[in-house]
C-alpha cells in the first residue's frame, strides 16, 4: 500500500501541474487581446491628432479667405475714396478702411496662433508615428514570446499526459477508482493529503490520535475523517518534526 500511495502522490502532482499549465494557457487569449487593445488605443490617439491637424488646416484656409475678402474690401474702398465729393463721405470711408484693417490684423494674429498650433501638432504626430513603429515592434516581439511559451506548454502537457498514463497504469484499479471518486468530490481536485504532526494537509484539521498511530503502524488505506481525502504519512516531515 505504501508504494501504491507514493505512486498516487506522484499522479496527483502530475495532475496538479497539468491543470496549472491548462489554466495558464486559458489566459493566453486574454493576454493577446490586451496587447491588441494597447496598440489600438495608441492608434486612436494618433488618428485623433491627425484629424485635429486637418481641422487646423481647414481653419487656417478659412482665415486666409476671410483676410483676402477684407483686403479686397479695403482696396475697393480705397478706390472709392478718390472719387468722393464731401468731407463727411471721405471720413466715413476712412473709418470703414480702418475697421477692416483692424479686423484683418486680428485675423492675422489668429492665423499665426493657428500656425503655431499646426506646427506643434505636426511635430507630435511625427513623434507618435515613430513611437507607433516601436510599439508595434515591441508588441510583435511580446506575441512571439507568448507563442513560443504556448508551444512549450503544449509540449509539456503532452509529456505530462504520457507520464500520467504510465503512472495510472501502475496503480491498482480499485485504488485508482477510489482516488478518482475522492478527487471529484474535492473542490480543488486534490484527493491525496499528507499528514504532518497529526494534521491533515488537505483540510488542516487534526486526525484523531488513534487513527494517527494507525497510520504510522499499519500499511492501510485511510481517509481523513473531516475532508475524506486519502491520507498518507509523509516520512520526510515525520523525521524532521518528531
Ligand atoms: Zn482532511
Image (spheres, rainbow, N blue to C red):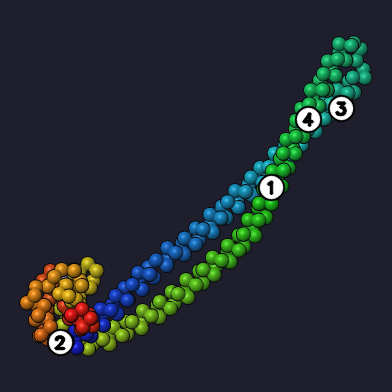
Residue under label 3: 75
Give the vertical position of 103 relative to 47 (above or below): above
The answer to whether marks 3 and 1 mark residues whose Cβ atoms lie closer than 8 Å is no
Q: Earlier in the sequence, mark 4 or mark 1?
A: 4
The answer to whether residue 179 is seen in the rendering is no
Q: CA distance from mark 4 to mark 2?
A: 101 Å
| Place of residue 92 in the rendered image (x, y in percent of width and height, measured from the top left) | 83, 15
Residue 113 vs residue 166, the one in the foreground: 113
Q: Which mark is residue 28?
A: none
**Which one is in front in this view, the residue at disc 4 or the one at disc 1?**
1
Which residue, given by chain and number where applicable, does mark 1 sit on?
120
Q: Is residue 4 visible?
A: yes
Please tell me the numbered disc located at residue 1. Answer: 2
Q: Nearer the viewer, residue 231 or 140?
A: 231
- Would you call the spot at circle 2 few (<14 residues within 10 Å), some (14-19), or many (20 or more)? some
Q: Quadrant of the N terminus?
A: bottom left
Q: CA–CA distance between discs 4 and 3?
A: 13 Å
Distance, label 1 to label 2, CA atoms, is 79 Å
User: Crowding near pointer 1: few (<14 within 10 Å), some, many (20+)?
Assistant: few
Quadrant where the C terminus sits is bottom left
Tell which of 174 and 240 is nearer to you.
Answer: 240
Marks 4 and 1, how far apart in space? 24 Å
Q: Which residue is mark 4?
A: 104
Residue 222 lies in what quarter of the image? bottom left
Determine whether, in the image, residue 132 is placed left or right of residue 220: right
- Mark nearer the N terminus (1 vs 2): 2
Amino acid at each position: 500500500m505504501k508504494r501504491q500511495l507514493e505512486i498516487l502522490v506522484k499522479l496527483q502532482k502530475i495532475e496538479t501541474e497539468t491543470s496549472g499549465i491548462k489554466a495558464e494557457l486559458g489566459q493566453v487569449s486574454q493576454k493577446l487581446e490586451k496587447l491588441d487593445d494597447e496598440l489600438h488605443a495608441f492608434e486612436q490617439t494618433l488618428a485623433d491628432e491627425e484629424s485635429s491637424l486637418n481641422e487646423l488646416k481647414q481653419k487656417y484656409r478659412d482665415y486666409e479667405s476671410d483676410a483676402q475678402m477684407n483686403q479686397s474690401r479695403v482696396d475697393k474702398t480705397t478706390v472709392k475714396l478718390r472719387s468722393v465729393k464731401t468731407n463727411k463721405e471721405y471720413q466715413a470711408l476712412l473709418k470703414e478702411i480702418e475697421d477692416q484693417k483692424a479686423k484683418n490684423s486680428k485675423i492675422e494674429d489668429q492665423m499665426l496662433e493657428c500656425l503655431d498650433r499646426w506646427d506643434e501638432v505636426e511635430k507630435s504626430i511625427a513623434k507618435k508615428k515613430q513611437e507607433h513603429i516601436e510599439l508595434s515592434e515591441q508588441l510583435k516581439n511580446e506575441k512571439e514570446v507568448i507563442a513560443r511559451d504556448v508551444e512549450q506548454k503544449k509540449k509539456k502537457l503532452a509529456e505530462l499526459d504520457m507520464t500520467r498514463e504510465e503512472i495510472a497504469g501502475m496503480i491498482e484499479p480499485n485504488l485508482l477508482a477510489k482516488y478518482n471518486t475522492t478527487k471529484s468530490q474535492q473542490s480543488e481536485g486534490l484527493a491525496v493529503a499528507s499528514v504532518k504532526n497529526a494534521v491533515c494537509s488537505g483540510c488542516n484539521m487534526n486526525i484523531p490520535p488513534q487513527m494517527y498511530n494507525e497510520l504510522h503502524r499499519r500499511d492501510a488505506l485511510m481517509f481523513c475523517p473531516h475532508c475524506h481525502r486519502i491520507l498518507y504519512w509523509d516520512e520526510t516531515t515525520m523525521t524532521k518534526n518528531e
